[in-house]
Image (cartoon, grey):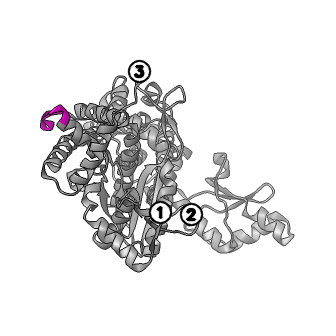
Amino acid sequence: MQSLPALLDARLREVTGVDPEMRPATKPQFGHFQSNVALRLAKEQGRPPREVAADVVAKLDVDDLCEPLEIAGPGFINFRMRSDVLAGAVSALLEDPHGGINPANHPQRVVIDYSAPNVAKTMHVGHLRTTIIGDCFNRVLSALGHTVIPQNHIGDWGTQFGMLIEEVLDEGLDVSTLSLDEADALYKRAAARFKEDTEFATRARARVARFQGGDEQSLGIWQQLVDISKPAFNEAYRRLNVKLTDDDLAGESTYNADLPVLVKELEDSGVAVVDDGALCVFVEGFEAPLIVRKSDGGYGYATTDLAAIRRRVRELHADRIIYVTDLRQAGHFAQVFAAARKAGFLPGDVTAQHVGYGMVLGTDGRPFKTRDGSAATLGSLLDAAEEVAAPNIALAAIKYADLSNGLQKDYTFDAERMVQTTGDTGPYLQYAHARVNQILRKAEAEGIHWGSVTVLEEPAEQQLALLLSGFGEVVDDVAHHLQPHKLCGYLYDLAGALASFYEACPVLKSEGDVRASRLALCAATKQVLAKGLDLLGIDAPERM
């Protein structure tokens, strides 16, 4: 569904040839929207603004949408939507099988790379953001009809496993009996030893070569570490209510066999050249080259990232690839994308986007830590929120706080504030949904029926109807620009308009067609709130 403001905007733009800069009217007596387009055109044309406004109004055909237009003040054009048009838009929303969401005209195959925890390590606060953000993109794009292919690029390969395996052998551990917390402690012991013990470090480096060369004992220990990590990851995903499963795993190890093949392609094509013993791809606009094979013959993250792009295009047939990682990796991915373009791994008709996010801060303005001052795990952050609210409310608070800010901004984790049911919070939206559901439930219990929206005379109910008509466009915008805070802002405005409607327009105490119409308006609002919250990965409770 196209929103009513967008329809007006398009028609006014067609007549004037410029952006009409439609704005909500400041007061109900001025209608629903105002445009200053005549004032701007008057400057260019050297004519009185009210004269220009009169010309625009004469040429503009919006009788099917608006009451007669008004020219106000020095030349503002006021637009008041027809109440029957508003009512029809909400009724169409109620009857729309897609719930107001506009199915994509050209569905794509979209690969989203997100979450990416490391094997044998506890998920930390950074994994919270990538997982929540990636899940939101998954939900939004899937709702529009795109085929979404999540890729959980877990850290399950590389040099760290040399020191892990050596430490396991030195300690004589049965890895299969460890919990992930115990594996994390093992990792920390091995890392400390690697720094302090030269002999151990030498053995660990040698172990990497044996491990990656296919040594059965090493691979057996590695597999055990992977096996104890996956259930812990899945438990975190369950708590976060995100759509990631083992089927979405595509760790670094899965690209191991592709690396020498990829490097040979790069070398044979001349895209990669040897420089100071390393095989490099020089990309215009970047001072340092992208190293795809180190001077010692090893491969780094860049090589694996190129292999991932290559596979996602050639085998997964991606039309669009989205990476959700720490903002500080923006430069790395910009160079990887450029190198992939140069190599032909990333054709011109495939879009690649990096979505970077900021840090989670404590109330002291510093990176979030637990009460004892240790680095915050994802679990400890969830625990902190659940100390002050039920799990579904706590999760709504966390997700909304994460998604309602611009993603690149840092945000403050303040559980006490985030779980409030007033103000700009996730629980406030949940409360709005529960409140409107209570009205509908009570009406049903009393045998009061409703169908479509037919009567919209009060400004508060008209404003609510206007907002409802814009839901589909907001979702489209999030899908295109990958900015979830716009959906959060829209839902917050909708909840606010719903509260104003409650105060100004009695529902159950009204009668006849007015009551039935207001109940239908409530039903449409509940529908949009529930769907919007679901797109954010937030529960829409029936009661609170």
Q: Position of residue 323 (x, y in %)?
A: 41, 56
Q: Which residue is at 37% across, 28% downward?
A: 385
> At label 2, which amino acid type do we have?
Phe
Helix, strand or loop at disc 3? loop
Q: Residues within 10 Å of mark 3 (few under 14, many from 20)?
A: few
* Of the two numbered discs 1 and 3 in the rendering, the one whose residue sits closer to the viewer: 1
For label 3, the residue is 371
> At label 1, which amino acid type do we have?
Leu
Question: Which quadrant of the view contains residue 237?
Answer: top left
Residue contact at pointers 2 and 1, CB within 8 angstroms: yes
Residue 113 seen from this side = yes
* Of the two numbered discs 3 and 2 in the rendering, the one whose residue sits closer to the viewer: 2
Q: Position of residue 78 (x, y in %)?
A: 68, 57
Image mark count: 3
Helix, strand or loop at disc 1? strand
Looking at the image, tell me whether mark 1 or mark 3 is earlier in sequence order: 1
- Indicate whether 518 appears above or below 307: above
> At label 3, which amino acid type do we have?
Arg
